[in-house]
Amino acid sequence: MATLEKIRSKSVFLLVVIFVALLAFILGDAITNGRNLFGNHTTVAKVGGDKIDYLDYQRKREELSRQLEEARRQNPAQYANFDVQLMPQIALNQLITEKLLSEAVKNMGITTSPEMLRRYMLENPQPSAEQMAIVRQLQALNVNVTSMAQAHDVIFNPKRNNLTQAQVEPLQRAWLALENEASARLAEQTYAMLLSGAMQPNELDKKALYNDFIELSQVQLAFRPYGQLDEKEYPVSDAELKAAYDADKSRYKVEEPTKEISFLSVNIAPSEADRAAASKLAAATASALRDSAGTLTRDLRKEGIAVEKRTLRGSDLPGGALRTFVTSAPRDSVSVVSDNMRGFTVVKMGRKYTEVDSVQLNLVQVAGATLPDKVLARLNSGLAVDSLASVFKTDSVMAQTEQWITLYDNKGKTEQLPQSQIDSLKNAGGRYIKLMSTPEGALLAQLAKQSPAKEIYEYQVVEYALHPSAKTINDATEKLEKFLASNNTAAKFRENAGKEGYNLQTFALTQSSDAVPRMAGYNMYYPDSRQVVRWVMIDGKPGEVSKIYESKEAASPALYVAAVNSEYSDYVPLSNADVKRALTEQVRRSKAGDAEIKKYQGKASDIATLASAMGVEPRDLPQFRFSARSGVNDQKVMGQIAGSKSGKKVILVKGDDGIYGYVVNGNTKEDFKYDDATYQRQYQQLFQPNMEQMLRGSKKVENNAYKFEAGE
């Protein structure tokens, strides 16, 4: 018994140890992932105090993905290069707007009236895809409905339409869910219209726009741009930079915590060895195609060779060496028509023949099991197609004459008519035949016309895309790893990258960054670079250098490294290179302007003399008005001229882009009648409100999407 008690006591002890270890593991894992057991590990973003959950975010992502696929299907050229790295931020932006709008609607107490909901659900000329899905489900139950009102009646009055409650219950739930969603969307649309309508100009606003248009000045102008200023002649001190920064600090406010990085991208191209191997593979491929079998071995196919048989009209053949070979080579001949840094193309010639590429048919659709034979007999005995309606019931027979059917397009042979049907039509000698037949009816057809015969070419094309080999990628990776081993701080990374032949770029990344941009101001990103953003925003500290990240694009693989230079959450600091550069130029131009004003002040009584002294040509602006097309680029100078009284005195003023000398010879008003509606529209065009910013107000947005994207 004593031994048993000892075992029991040890078991309890072991259970406690296991529990403590398990708890430590769970807590440790949570801490490692930047989360805890009671944290916001499913919160993708916060808008004020409201949270956006990961499941909602994932549903929105899936919805956008479906929309993208549909857009690509309908317009493949426009969306072929759409960067899917944009999708997370697009999804989150939509969810944020929806959250803000939903809260605003709730606070305002806006609801959708039953009449408005009824019109939307039952009388909308463009029903939603979800409504049409319900219609298709009813049709699958052999219920013929042609409108949303009919669908609603069938769903909620099943007995009257010979359906059971069990059959329509899922459709009822779906319809009510659509009504709830539509009610919310309509209320949001109402609020958005009210909010937009609240941005209206008052009489002073409209009159100000009118006065800016009708008030004209006759101005003579001399303008001398600063050009390239000498740094030694106009030095800029740290104190002057600090003063300029403090004066315009509000311009550098940031909305989100920001990290400034130095970014390195190594694009890996095929090596000379890769190129030589591809040429050897091209020769082996051509040799295999020349043998009697004309097939490629399994080993060749493993190399990533793509084989395709093509049948094209002569006018649709691609240009260059391929076209020359195909149009002139005998059957079964083989040629390597291209072999370069992009890969190779090998062609084996097949048949050449002539064929019509389109036919014109007269088509007659006939319903029933026996009627098609009667209609076919009458047509082939001489009855005109136009006379069918007078002999047979119009709901049983329908004719479509002179229908052109394309047999070949620019991609090759189409599938609109099988070859057997084409042959049957040609062999019928102008008579009607049954093109298709079922127990429910038949399609009768007559060959009316054929296009002129075209040259058709059949050939086999073998293509190989040359990518960097594993060895080439490993060599580039090893070289970069060696560089990082001795340059593992941001300072060393920046200082020595150029010496090793690496080109660094500087970017400012935030929580809302989709990826690392290829260039500032454009939605073009380095492939698979969201993973870099994730490291920067979660783990990267100022002074640290990331590990090597890889692009997963096989055609153009790349290696990425980022070094965090600095981070800030309120204002871009003066130490930022772009800010410092801009302020240095601003201060230098201001000092140059002061010197130029002092140089020419009081030394010219008219514009012609001043312009001559400046070494520029004077300009006459007979209809100067306060507008973007005034002839003066600097807006402050433009406003000063527009507000000046007429007189003969030459006025010198310092601008951001140069010094201006001007004389206002007269001020007049254009004889243009005031129209309230015109300036109402102009105001709304000039001052379009930012709806999302109005909804957001002072609420802060915390964006955590990057934590859920790109993996480690």
Image (spheres, rainbow, N blue to C red):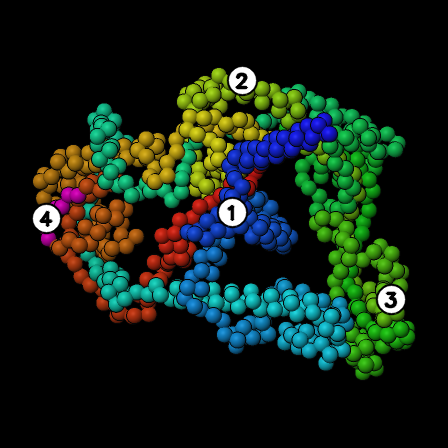
Q: Is residue 650 magenta?
A: yes
Residue 453 position in % (x across, y down): 78, 53
Instruction: Give residue 321's quadrant in the image.
Output: top right
- Of the numbered discs 1 and 2, the one sitting upstream in the chain is 1
Instruction: Give residue 403's quadrant in the image.
Output: bottom right
Element assignment for label 4: loop
Q: Alpha-carbon distance for marks 2 and 3?
A: 73 Å
**Residue 699 in the image: above or below residue 432:** above
The structure residue drawn at horizontal position 39% and vertical position 64%, both measured from the top left corner, is: 195
Q: Residues within 10 Å of mark 2 (few under 14, many from 20)?
A: few
* Disc 3 target residue: 437
* Disc 2 target residue: 482
The structure residue drawn at horizontal position 65% and vertical position 74%, both measured from the top left corner, is: 152
Q: Residues within 10 Å of mark 3 (few under 14, many from 20)?
A: some
Q: Which label was assigned to residue 236? A: none
* Disc 1 target residue: 43
The structure residue drawn at horizontal position 87% and vertical position 66%, both measured from the top left corner, is: 437
Q: Is residue 677 magenta?
A: no
Q: Residue type at mark 2?
A: Lys
- Of the numbered discs 3 and 4, the one sitting upstream in the chain is 3
Q: Residue type at mark 3?
A: Ser
Q: Please report the bounds of the magenta region as a residue range.
A: 647-653
Element assignment for label 1: strand
- Of the numbered discs 1 and 4, the one sitting upstream in the chain is 1
Q: Residue type at mark 4?
A: Lys
Q: Residues within 10 Å of mark 1 (few under 14, many from 20)?
A: many
Q: Which label was assigned to residue 649? A: 4
